[in-house]
Every structure is written in C-alpha cells, then in structure tokens.
Amino acid sequence: MATISAAPIVIDGKGHLLGRLASIVAKQILSGQKVVVVRSELINASGSFFRAKLRYHEFLNKRHLVNPKKSGPFHHRAPSRILYRTIRGMVPHKTARGAAALERLKLFEGVPPPYDRKKKMVVPQALRVLRLKPGRKYCTIKRLSHEVGWSYRDVVDRLEEKRKVKAAAFHERKVAATKVRTQALKDAAAAAPLSEKLAVYGY
C-alpha cells in the first residue's frame, strides 16, 4: 500500500485484529487512499469476550448530562460503526483534513453487491493468526454487537450464505471456461502445421 491508487482498496475484515487494522486504515485514508472494509462483523478483538462485553457496558454508561440524544456520546452497536469509531479515534476528525479522510472510508457488514465481484485484500500486519500468540483469548465483533443490541446478525448471516452459493457457482463456471479456452489454444497450436500447408494452396 505504498502507492496511492485511484480505485478504492477493498479489505476483507475477516480474521483481522480491530486496533491493528484500524491504525493501518487510518494512516491510509489520511494519505489520500480510498478504503473499503467488508465483512467487518468478522473482525476479532484480543482478550476474552467477557472482558470486551464489560468494557462495552462501561462505555454505555458514559453519557452527556444535558441532552444525551443530541450531544452524545452515541453508543453504536453495529460492527461497522464500532470499527468506524475506532478509526475515528486515530484521525484528527475535527479538522478539515481529518473530516476529508473519513469521507474516503466505507465500512460494511457482509459483502454488498458492488464489492462482491471485486478483488479483496488482507493486511498481514493486522491478521490475528500472525499477530496474536497462539492460545491467547479473542472474540469476534459480531458476537459482541449482538449481545449489546445489534439486531441484524441473522439477516447478515442469511445474505452471506446466499452470496457464498452464488460465488461458488461463478467460480465453477470460470474454471470450466478457463479449461475450455486452454484446450482450444492447445488444439490451435497442434493444428498450426496443417494450417501452414493449407495456406500454401490458398486456404
């Protein structure tokens, strides 16, 4: 990700650690790169689920005295919004530069239509299997969100199952088409000497 591309970078959030992914994404959007994160519900957080839930409930107690509905802080339950708030904390969001950086960021649960056909990337520096010591406890944001009031877990799961079936069918068709094309090229190469002989006679 050293160079900035005009097309947005699509990151598959599955199996990444929340803070590590957020810090890398924050740096990219500040440098001018557009970033899209899909499957944000499958992002991991280090530490046990019980600890994460206690921390979130502590956060729920933080409220503005005068008018909490208007003044915040707003306690978003959706995984994409939890990731957004984590990234926002790493960006100077009250300045024009920070606000512009956050405009370059898009976060989704699941993989919505424009991005289901795009190539997705992972960030090795943020992957749990590479960065968290084996045996350490961790939890998924999906479970945490569901436990504190996010009501779309089943909807996202159902849509993801549908998408995976369609993706598998597309992959089968693509493999079959590639096989046919490879065979056609082999046949054409084998028939090349015959074509040359026919060309001599004007065919």
Image (cartoon, rainbow, N blue to C red):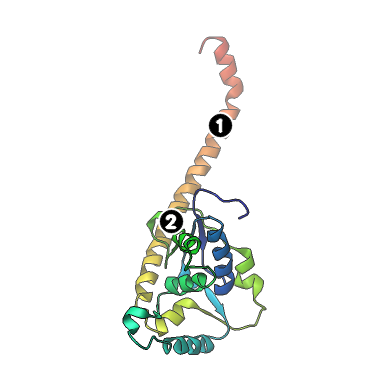
* Left or right, residue 68 beside residue 116: left
Q: Residue furthest right?
A: 133
195 or 78, nearer to the observer: 78
Amino acid at pointer 2: Tyr
Residue mark closest to the camera, 2 vs 1: 2
Going from N to C along the chain, the mark reached first, 2 or 1, is 2
The vertical placement of 31 against 188, above or below, is below
In front of the other: 90 or 143: 90
| Numbered disc total | 2
Q: Mark 1 falls on what kind of element? A: helix
Quadrant of the rendered image containing residue 159 = bottom left
| Image height of 162 relative to 200, above or below | below
Task: Give the side of residue 132 with respect to residue 82, left or right.
Answer: right
Q: Residue at x 58, y 68 (%)?
A: 23
Residue placed under numbered mark 2 in the picture = 115
Percent across and percent down for residue 61 are: 42, 90
Q: Quadrant of residue 27?
A: bottom right
Q: Position of residue 38 (x, y in %)?
A: 46, 64
Residue 110's place in the image compared with 185, above or below, is below
Above or below 23: residue 49: below
Where does label 1 land, which residue? Answer: 187
Q: Position of residue 161 (x, y in %)?
A: 40, 66
Report the front residue among 60 and 52. 60
59 relative to 191 in the view: left or right? left
Mark 2–mark 1 distance (CA, rounded to whole Å): 37 Å
Q: Which mark is residue 173?
A: none
